[in-house]
Every structure is written in C-alpha cells, then in structure tokens.
Image (cartoon, grey):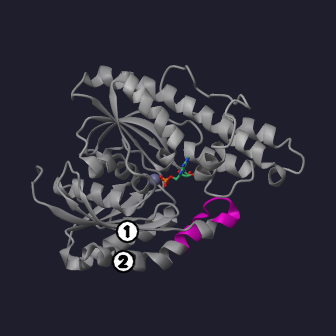
Amino acid sequence: MSATPTELVVLGIETSCDETAAAVVRGIPPGPGQILSNVVHHQIENHEPYGGVVPEIAARAHVELLDSVIARALSDAGKDMSQIDGFAATAGPGLIGGVMVGLLSAKALALAMNKPLVALNHLEAHALSARLVEGTEFPFLLLLISGGHCQLMAAEGVGKYNLYGATIDDAVGEAFDKVAKLIGLPYPGGPEIERAARQGNPKRFAFPRPMLGRRGMEFSFSGLKTAVRQIAGGVPGGAPNIEPKLVADFAASFQAAVVDVLVDRARIAMRKFRSDFGCPKEAMDFVVAGGVASNRSIAAALKSLAAEEGFRLSLPPPALCTDNGAMVAWAGLERLSRGLTDALGSPPRARWPLESPEHIA
Ligand code: KG4
Ligand code: ZN
C-alpha cells in the first residue's frame, strides 16, 4: 500500500529494558510529528542495588507499572482509546520478559479496539526518532549508541537499513555502565561518568582506543573496560576507596578514549555513505541516537566531525535519545501510514537484527 497523507494518532509502548514507557504521537511522515504525551517510568531504584538491570525484576515492574503508564499517556494527550488509530510496541530486541509484557498489552488493545498492531523493532524506533523531531529525509547515516547497541548504518527508508558496522563485544553504553561500577560510581553509569569526567584529566591514563585506525566500521569496547579494570583494581580496598580526584581522572580518560573511537569509526562511515549515495541532499544527515547520544562530550566531538566531513548532525533531545514511548509511537505511525501492520500472533524476540527480512518494507 502506498503512503497516505492522512494524519494518524498512534500509541507507542516501550518495555524492552528498564524503562516502562508509553506515549501518544500525531503526525504524517516524514514528520516532524507532534508528541501529545510521553510518559517514562525509569526503574532505576529497582536495579541500582545490583549495579545493572536484572531481567526478572524489570519484567515484574513492567507488569505492575504499564497499565497506569498507558492511562497517563492517554490522559496527558487528552485522548481516549477510541481516538487512537493504531497501537505500536517494541517486539524486540531486548529482555524477553519485558518485551512480552509491552507487546501483549499492545495486542490486547489492538484486539479490543479493533485497530491495527505494529510490532516494532526497537532499533528502528531509535533510527526514526530524528524524523519525529525534525522530519529528516532519507537517506541518512545513523550512529546508534545505547546500552544494548553500538552500530552504524545507512537508513534508506522505513524498513530499509544497511548495516555498516557494529560492536563485536560490548555496546558503548554497557561499557560506560561497567566502567562506572569498576570505579565505584552508581548505576546507570553513563551520566555519572560524564559528570565525574568534567572535573577529571582526560590525559591522566592512556587507555587503549580499540579499532582506531582499522579498516571497516566495527567497534570493540571490552579491551578498554579491561584496561580500566587493571588499573582501578590495583587501588587498595577497591572501587569504594578510590578518591574522587582519581575517579574523575578515570572517568575523563575513559570518556576521551570512547570519543576517539566513535569519531574514528563514524568518519569512515561518513566516507562510505558519501560513496554509496553521492550527495543526495544539500548536506547529508548524520543522526545520532540512543542513550549515549545525550553525552555532551560525545555530541560535541561528533558535531565537529560532521562539520569537517560535510554532514549535518541531527541529535534528538536527551528525553528522546534514551528509551521512550514517543519514538515507538512515531515508528509505528511511519509503518502504519505505509500499511505495514503486524499480525496479532507476532512473536516477541530477544534478538532481532534490523536487517532481517521481517523488516523489509
Ligand atoms: O537508549 P537507552 O536508554 O537504552 C538502550 O536501548 O540501551 O540507553 C541507555 C544507556 C545506558 O548504558 C546509559 O549508561 C547510557 O545510555 N547513557 C549515557 C549517558 N546517558 C545515558 N552514556 C554516556 N553518557 C551519558 N550522558
Ligand atoms: Zn534503546
């Protein structure tokens, strides 16, 4: 079915990790869309004692929270269920228990209201968030940097993504979280490291820059994490006894290494994108999405890189970079407006690469 210019209102549900989120979005592709509500319940206090997300605890919390989060999303938007044109939920990849909770709720709502279901890939929701915010046209280069993912891809259209490179081990946000734990900072580690790094000396420790200067666009962060562990582990008494100045220097040196790696990999991707697509627009768009994109040092470095390479950086605001329902609702709206809906039997998936055939539009 071809795209229709009708405005749609979609409810999106996100439960693939530790955010229980729902939102209502209105619009017409390519956007920008209008966010009528965006309710996010961060389960930080549930997981903080464990230093990371515990899947069982997350799934149970989603069950307890989701109904009220959805009710608030509707009331904040001033809509009732009958005014929703379609229901979208993350169907993977993610923690399977949580994905099941959100997807089942969306299926129940779609069935009860006799409206279409969109069973979305979480990565596609992140990928299309720049269209929600500023109506970015295809094709664009996407760097997705989150707690579960680190990849570069060319987004050519809804359901049309060409993977340039991904991490071969840890995701970048995961590295932030693990390193934070090693140096005694609380969970989630990304914002804590960013805060500590402001007072630190980025040259104090010459941490490795994995993959730097290598061909290809893969990432690797486990060696960097190990390097931090080796030095931090030598501090007598371990992480709780690392003095604040040293914590700040660890954080700043680690963050500087991550920045160098991301810039190096993204530069290669920009050159590949240019050779793949020529210069299809006035300036080519470089979209950075995922929770780590809210890091200001990373964003600033990627902005200068984009300027050097003739790209325009497009960075959703932090609330739309970390997991949220609005990006799910918007990606659902993009699919729905193209007639791309899913059967009520669509399965939840723990793993689901964005280039797999199910997405091809
Ligand atoms: O996109 P997101 O909310 O969830 C996933 O889909 O993974 O990303 C969460 C990740 C966490 O690892 C968190 O530590 C990281 O994003 N993060 C940051 C910052 N804010 C969140 N990493 C670095 N700097 C930040 N300011
Ligand atoms: Zn995410």
Quarter of the rendering containing residue 48:
bottom right
Q: Residue 176 lies in magenta, yes or no?
A: no
Q: Is residue 337 above or below residue 163?
A: below
Compute the Cα span from label 1 to label 2: 8 Å
> In the image, is 119 to the left or to the right of 195?
left
| Residue nearest the viewer, comparing 92 with 32 | 32
Q: Above or below — where is 205 with respect to 118?
A: above
Q: Where is residue 175 shown, x and y percent of the image?
A: 62, 44
* Cβ atoms at labels 1 and 2 below 8 Å apart: yes
Q: Who's the residue at 58% across and 35% down the image?
A: 258
Q: Main secondary structure of the magenta part?
A: helix
Query: Residue 147 appears at what percent x and percent y?
Result: 54, 50
Residue drawn at (84%, 50%) of the image: 238
Which residue position holds label 2?
Answer: 72
Q: Is mark 1 within 8 Å of ligand 2?
A: no
Mark 2 surroundings within 10 Å by alpha-carbon count, few (fewer than 14), some (14 through 19), many (20 or more): some
Q: Residue at x 25, y 21 (%)?
A: 278
- Identify the residue position indicated by label 1 in the image: 22
Mark 1 Cα-neighbour bin, 10 Å: few <14, some 14–19, many ≥20: many
As drawn, the residue found furthest toward the right would be: 236
The quarter of the displayed image where residue 6 is located:
bottom left
Range drawn in magenta: 48-60
